[in-house]
């Protein structure tokens, strides 16, 4: 199982044009910013849930869906800006793998 629990949208990718390693890497670089945001949002969702579990133990504090959505979106944007080079490279490699898998499935 991959450490990246995100769905990457390949609907705008012409899989038939991907032939060489460079083609796959170029497409992965294009998809990387969106994937970083999605990964950050996934982390934000989990963080939100964990924070509300611990707060909910003795408190009856309620948060709105818009507060949650704003928190998750901000976490995604922050992750995109602050991801390390290693994280970016690992995610780019993951995208290349997913592109290859999707191409094989077509």
Image (cartoon, grey):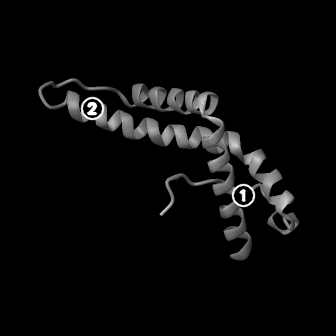
The spot of residue 105 in percent (x, y) is 68, 76
Query: Element type at marker 2?
Result: helix
Identified at 65% across, 42% down, the residue is 88
Classed neighbour count for the residue bearing mark 1: other residues with Cα under 10 Å, few (<14), some (14–19), many (≥20)? few
Closer to us: 65 or 49: 49
Identified at 49% across, 54% down, the residue is 3
Q: For the residues labelled 1 and 2, say whether their Cβ atoms are less than 8 Å apart.
A: no
Sequence-earlier tag: 1 or 2? 1
- Please give left or right for residue 99 compared with residue 54 in the image: right
Closer to us: 21 or 99: 21
Identified at 45% across, 27% down, the residue is 71
* Residue under numbered circle 2: 52
Residue 11: image tag: 1
Closer to us: 14 or 99: 99
Position of residue 87 relative to residue 25, above or below, is above
Position of residue 5 relative to residue 47, above or below, is below
Closer to us: 36 or 15: 36
Identified at 70% across, 44% down, the residue is 32
Position of residue 76 relative to residue 19, above or below, is above
């Amino acid at each position: 199982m991959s450490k990246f629990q995100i769905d990457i949208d390949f609907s705008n990718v012409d899989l038939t044009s991907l032939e060489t390693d460079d083609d796959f890497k170029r497409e992965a670089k294009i998809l990387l910013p969106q994937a970083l945001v999605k990964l950050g949002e996934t982390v934000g969702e989990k963080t939100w849930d964990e924070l509300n579990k611990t707060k909910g133990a003795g408190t009856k504090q309620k948060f709105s869906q818009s507060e949650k959505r704003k928190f998750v979106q901000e976490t995604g944007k922050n992750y995109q800006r602050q991801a390390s080079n290693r994280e970016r490279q690992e995610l780019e490699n993951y995208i290349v793998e997913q592109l290859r898998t999707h191409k094989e499935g077509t």
